[in-house]
Image (tube, grey):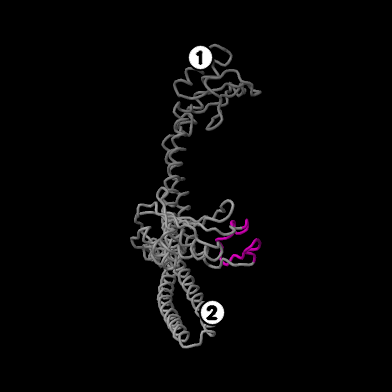
Amino acid sequence: MLKRFIGARLHRQLFVWFGATIAATALVIGAVSWVTRPPDQPFGGGAPHVAGFVGTWFARVWDDKSERARLAGDLANALSVNLTIEDTEGKVLERVGRGCFFHSMNVDVRRGGLFLGRIVACPRVPRHGGLAFVLALLCATATVWGATLLITHKLTRPLSELISVTRELGEGKLSARVRLRRTHSGELGKLAESVNEMASRIERQLSDQKELLAAVSHEMRSPLARLRVLTELVGNTLPENANANVVKMEAEISEIDDLVGKLLANSRLEFGALERRELRGQDVALHALERCSLGSAILVDASDNISFLADPTLIYRALANLLANARIHGAQVERLEVRTEGDLLCFEVTDSGPGFSEAALARGFSAFFREPTGSNAGSSLGLGLSLVSRIAEAHGGTVWAVNRTPRGAKVGFSVKLG
């Protein structure tokens, strides 16, 4: 029976739990009310005999107002009742205590068959009656509250774990799983199993894609390298007037190689395949200048050659993209500055070109943004600056681009130290 209840669907569990809570609350209120209840009859079990006795005594003193009042007071105090004396028309003649609203008993007063009036009696509510009601209410509230706490804990604990696991999956921790327990049954159990299956499939797919990325990287780079060698060999065997076409071929191959490198870096970011190593700002800058065939004289290092953790391939790619963008769109690279700002290491490239348009400043870091106005009208910034932005973000930094006065621009990115 218990196993069937644990394995029941969520709506059935809620129905049973709340039903049990209501039943328990009713039992608590009933028990407290039973303990603190007043007597059902104002004169106890011998009510009929006592009523006849009371009616006889009041018939004897009915015409004597003072004796009637004294008898009413003595009787009310002796039997701990509220007592009201009414005439034949229901008008109150005497009252001892409060009026009667429940558990009242009427005693007719007669003399020789003549109806003189009526005595209305009811038990006095104990002084602690109000306290007993409050106590019963508090007990009932505590019962419902305690049961609600158990129910909410039972429901929210697996949901909280599901939220935590899905948050970890969203942050890239694909090994996170929901730990299924005996209480994870019904809809919650099925949801937990679905989340675990989804995480396993995503982890397996990303693993396969990373392997494919590594294979494609090798397979594409190798023929491109061979093509470069072949064009150089062909160029050496052709007449001088035919070398122009070979140079164009080399330029196209270099551009394809550069685009492949950007696409592979972009895919690496998509898959979260970062391999962080300890690097130094000055070494990264010198390596990027060498790759772009620029001299080290334009390097301004204000970082004290500080070290940081980053993916070397992506950082080199980001800095090379800035230098290439400044050389192509900014006429000439004037300076490459490396500096620290708080817990960030900044790389900034300064050029002497026409600068960015307002549209480029706003959207220049978007993929394949095309310059609409100015001297660079119609030119495309491609994946370069977009990739820089994503690499900086993956390393806890930001990007920026500002125009200089009267000409030129500064474009840079930062990475988090430590």
Q: Residue at x 53, y 26 (%)?
A: 121
Instruction: Specify whether residue 12 is in view.
Output: yes
Is residue 81 placed above or below 174 in the rendered structure?
A: above
Q: Which mark is residue 248?
A: 2
Going from N to C along the chain, the mark reached first, 2 or 1, is 1
Residue closest to the eye, 266 or 65: 266
> Mark 2 or mark 1, which is nearer to you?
2
Label 1 is placed on what type of residue?
Answer: Arg
Q: Which residues are magenta?
A: 357-377
The percent coordinates of residue 329 (x first, y second) are 56, 64
The percent coordinates of residue 102 (x first, y second) are 54, 32
The percent coordinates of residue 235 (x first, y second) are 48, 84
Q: Is residue 361 magenta?
A: yes
Q: Residue at x 54, y 66 (%)?
A: 328
Label 2 is placed on what type of residue?
Answer: Lys
Residue closest to the eye, 8 or 334: 334
Instruction: Specify whether residue 15 is in view.
Output: no
Q: Which residue is mark 1?
A: 70
